[in-house]
Image (cartoon, rainbow, N blue to C red):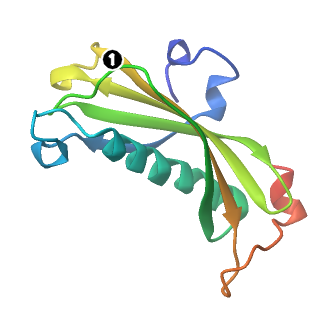
Amino acid sequence: MPDPNLFDEGDPSQWRLAIRVLAMPADTNAAGDIFGGWLMSQADIAGATVAVQAAAGRVVTIAVNEFRFVSPVAVGDLVDIYARVQRLGTTSVSVEIRAWARREMDPESRHHVAVANITYVAVGADGRPRPIGASRKKQ
């Protein structure tokens, strides 16, 4: 379970560690800074893992409602991305995402690096929106 001090609102038990990834030199620009787009991509993947479970199947990203960079990610940082369902609609799932970086693999050195809210739509085999089952909405 995430440390309750990591989050400024809500029940910490609702958050899931959705992805953990190491920022590598290949993820940088010519100046050696981690691309913001790399972090956005990781957040989208993390959010999708939660959305797939909530929708009980395939989802696609429909909107990035918010993405806020809080502090930079450095090469060698271990990035933990936590996510939780914020809203479950008829065909869509909004996911709240928080990203944290550990400097030099030090578990005590945690830096908040991003906040996001991304909406996914459940789709069927034909790629068209499908309803999310009533039994899933109760979870």
List the single residue furthest toward the bottom.
126
The residue located at (63%, 39%) in the rendering is 84
Left or right, residue 22 beside residue 96 = left
Reply above or below: 106 against 52: above
Name above or below for residue 90 compared with residue 116: below
Q: In the figure, is residue 107 to the left or right of 137?
A: left
- Look at mark 1 in the image and give the residue it sits on: 110
Left or right of 96: which side holds 101?
left
Q: Residue at 66% across / 33% down in the picture?
A: 14
Percent x, y of residue 3: 49, 19
Helix, strand or loop at label 1? It is strand
Q: Residue at 21%, 21% (x, y): give it.
A: 103
Q: Residue at point 42% right, 20% down?
A: 70
Other-residue count near label 1 (Cα within 10 Å), few / some / many at <14 / 14–19 / ≥20: some
Which image quadrant is residue 40 in? top left
Foreground residue, 98 or 134?
98
| Type of amino acid under label 1 | Arg
- Of 60 and 14, nearer the camera is 60
Which quadrant holds residue 30? top left
Total marks in image: 1
In this view of the protein, which residue sits in the foreground, 14 or 34? 34
